[in-house]
Amino acid sequence: MQRTVFDADHEAFRQTVRAFIEKEVLPEYDTWLEKGAPRELFRKLGDLGVMGFDIPEEYGGAGPTSFTYQAVVLEEAGRAGVILGHFGVTAGIVLPYLLRLANANQRARWFPGIASGDITFAIAMTEPGTGSDLAGIRTTARRSEDGSHYVLNGAKTFITGARNSELVVVVARTSPASSDDRRSGLSLLVVDTASEGFGFGRKLRKLGQQAADTNELSFTDVHVPAENLLGEEGQGFSYLGQNLPRERLAIGVTTVAAARAAIEQARAYTLERRVFDKPVAAFQNTKFVLAECATEVEAATALLDRGLELDERGELTGADAAKIKLFCTEVAGRVIDKCLQLHGGYGYMLEYPIARLYADTRVTRIYGGTSEVMKTIIAKDLGL
């Protein structure tokens, strides 16, 4: 079906992004899978103009930009079966917080570097004992007696992109939770990864998404300047919820693109691969499986595009985004699994892109809120 969410300008931009990936990413991607995406990638993305979406022009950014342009970048990466390091974390997750919360001084300090790719961000929420339950965060930040800085102590895990980042937004408890609200007392601090006491633990070994590093972090009496407090002290939990619909929409974009790529890979493979002296694509089972996959992806695309339209109008709700993430990630999981099956034994070999798609996509039903959390949000919206 023809999509209407993108216009001619989007398609011209799409060709630019596609050419960038073909020239700058694909030739080196096998190395990235072993060593992670290089730091230089983000400067190249800065030159391309995609690191500074929504950053005011006075700081070197593109100014107000529809999220649909970022969606094009995510779709093209999905089409090519690549992970652009932690581009999605810096540009898609952290930057919206900065655009909303950063004061004039902070904007002047950070925005030019983000737009150029000289500064990238990670965000540190998850702790060894707290996943979806952010109210259980134990990392603490005690303000010094003279008020000049915070003293940060604690540990985080599953942090994407930290080793390739100059700054990390750390969610820490600056005051005890109140008896009637476990979520109170959390704050957002921007921490320099070169700070004394800032430690990198293990680089975690993952099933997929090898081009983006994922780490453990530790903080031992890290001094964080008070001017690096993002927003108001104690309001961190409310801030974190404000960008979740957009984050979950972006995950929907990525997974639908991956599922679409899987169908194309399976179609091409089954047309070429011969079994019992005829192409695998000639068997009725192959035709039916791919027909089912194509229909599911079309339905997911329709839901996703509706979400992009709502986001454009500022009307995307938390429940809307939860439905999109739940449906799109579950569809992608089913479709990619079926497409891998059509590859037979070769589908299990990492030299085939379908195997990487399978591994890379599995986590999308976990991060950004698990499928079970999405169901809880949707049920609550139903009044249950």
Image: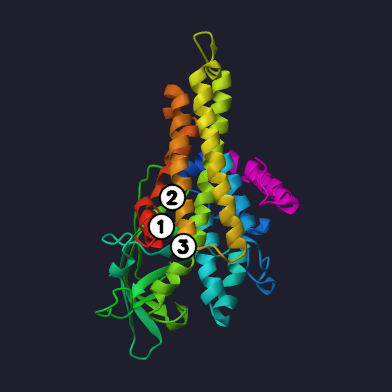
Residue shown at 49% from the left, 52% from the top:
324
Residue 209 visible? The answer is: no
Residue in front for this viewpoint, 82 or 184: 184
Q: Work out whether mark 3 precedes mark 2 in sequence or the reverse, and give the earlier one.
A: 3
Residue in front for this viewpoint, 74 or 4: 4
Residue at the spot of label 2: 326
Q: Quadrant of the N terminus?
A: top right
Q: Quadrant of the C terminus?
A: bottom left
Whole-percent x, y for residue 211 in the image: 48, 46
Task: Count numbered badges in the picture.
Answer: 3
Whole-percent x, y for residue 139 in the image: 30, 70
Kindly indicate whether the residue at mark 2 contacts the one at mark 1 (C-beta within 8 angstroms). Answer: yes
Report the amino acid beneath label 2.
Leu
Q: Work out whether mark 1 precedes mark 3 in sequence or the reverse, and give the earlier one.
A: 3
Residue shown at 40% from the left, 78% from the top:
235
Q: Work out whether mark 1 precedes mark 2 in sequence or the reverse, and give the earlier one.
A: 2
Which secondary structure, mark 2? helix
Q: What label does residue 318 carry, if any?
A: 3
Residue 124 visible? The answer is: yes
Q: Nearer the viewer, mark 1 or mark 2?
A: 1
Residue in front for this viewpoint, 196 or 354: 354
Residue in front for this viewpoint, 356 or 309: 309
Q: Quadrant of residue 349?
A: top left
Report the amino acid beneath label 3.
Gly
Whole-percent x, y for residue 80 in the image: 58, 40
The magenta stretch is: 1-27
Which secondary structure, mark 1? helix
